[in-house]
Amino acid sequence: MRKLLTILLAAFLIASVAAPPVAAGAAGASGATGASAAQAEATCEYPVELTDATGEDVTLDEPPERVVALQASDAQTVFEIGAEESLVGMPINDFTSHHDAGNRTNVAVEGQQNVDVETVVDLEPDVVLAANVTAPEDVEQLREAGVTVYHFETAEDLTDVRENVQRTGELTGACEGAQERIDWMDERLGALETALEGVERPLAYWSMGGGYTAGNGTFQNAILETAGVENLAAEAGIAGWQEISNEVVIEENPEWIVYGSADPEMEPALSEGAMETTAYEEGNLVAVDSNAVSQPAPHVVTAIETIVEAVHPEAYEEAQAILEEGNGTEGASENATDANGTVANATNGSVGEEPNETADSNETANESTGVGENTTNETGENATDETDADDETENATDGNGTEANATGENATNDTDGAENATDPEESAESDDGDSIPVGIVAAVVAAIAVIAAAVVGFRRL
């Protein structure tokens, strides 16, 4: 009889101790799996070997301690993913004025957009980031001097912009920050996509000035389409960055004109053809930060939101509501700069103030949607062709002379309260914590059954 009681007591103890951990493990399995998978994707692993636009294999044995960004979009991306601590050199000009250059070295030739090769070499960087518009000869000179350079592909759409961000993360050891920034982009663009479903898409003309525009195969075309408008240049069969005649603009008669501007209050420099359209007559003009629409980097989202707010205000408000309902905090970067160059929480809420610190009207555009190697547009500035990875420079000019190929150095200054919003998942977990775990209930039931069996057995004995 004593032997029987001993066995029953042991069974009771096993049931009481084992059940809760099993239940707890089951409860946390799904969430833990998702989190670990996302973290694995965002973890940098070294050594890393990547092939750039020129076919060069770039190998890094460890995270770089000294990074140089040759172009404004390179610098923007580095700051946006939180890798600026290792940034020792960057172009310091109107196109990067929204970032704190600190004591970093200016690698642009004074008064120009060309790269100061000697200065870059003297900085002894572990890796140099070169946007695709970087002159091939500059890249070659740096490599001949023993410098590791990664030359990026031309960004033709938003997928390419995302890839630029991810690749920059791999090259700087900031993979987690890169993934967070991509998540921020996807969250905001996803809200816009939902809000824009079923809306009419009016025809819009993207005016770069000097008679130039952006057609198929450009990320500006993707910006316009994502913002819920049809691109006149694409409809007219234009590919890349090319001139468009006044006759074509007048014939297509767009309902909206979108242009890059250093100051939204300034009158745009439009062609005669643009001024004879319905868009101009009705005042349907959208000023977008020149940097936001011209650098293939995270702030393309700002340009898209600006256009949607003007053309589809109801959809814009709906998108903001979607972000607020979803708290808009997951994957958001904590380091986006607002329109005035200050650090802002870019998680949720409405678009911030219009960026207002870009190049003046006589500046040469940097990282531009250029139109032909070493050609000169009607504004007298140098324009370059970004459609060929080997022939691009950063000297195209948009209609107002501001940097044109770099999606704005000015991320939206989103609602500060979003950072403190409650995550639905966290709330659920909190509620669950006040209830009795399933495992404990199972253990109690098992214990009662064991005791009952023991009593019956005892009586029989």
Image (tube, grey):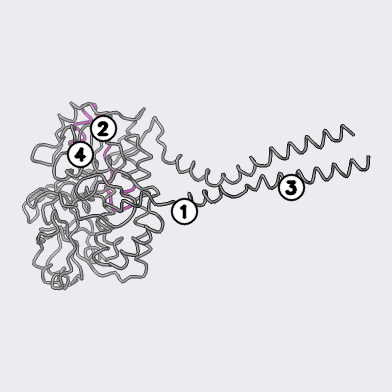
Residue 67, numbered circle: 2
Q: Which residues are magenta?
A: 135-162
**Three-letter residue code for mark 1:** Pro
Q: How many marks?
A: 4
Question: Label 2 to label 1, Cα distance in Å?
Answer: 39 Å
Image spot of residue 416 (x, y percent) = 31, 51
Image spot of residue 277 (x, y percent) = 14, 72
Going 22% across and 47% down the picture, which residue do you hit? 409
* Circle 3 crowding by C-alpha within 10 Å: few under 14, some 14–19, many from 20: few
**Three-letter residue code for mark 3:** Val
Where is 359 relative to 199, above or below?
Answer: above
Residue 445, numbered circle: 3
Mark nearer the viewer, 1 or 3: 3
Where is 376 relative to 87, above or below?
Answer: below
Which quadrant of the rendered structure holds the N terminus?
A: top right
| Residue 254 seen in the current view | yes
Q: Please indicate whether residue 109 sits to the left or right of residue 326 in the image.
A: left
Instruction: Determine the secondary structure under disc 3.
Output: helix
Question: Label 1 to label 3, Cα distance in Å?
Answer: 32 Å
**Three-letter residue code for mark 2:** Val
Q: Disc 4 marks which residue? A: 100
Image spot of residue 326 (x, y percent) = 41, 56
Image spot of residue 280 (x, y percent) = 14, 70
Mark nearer the viewer, 2 or 4: 4
Q: Earlier in the sequence, mark 2 or mark 1?
A: 2
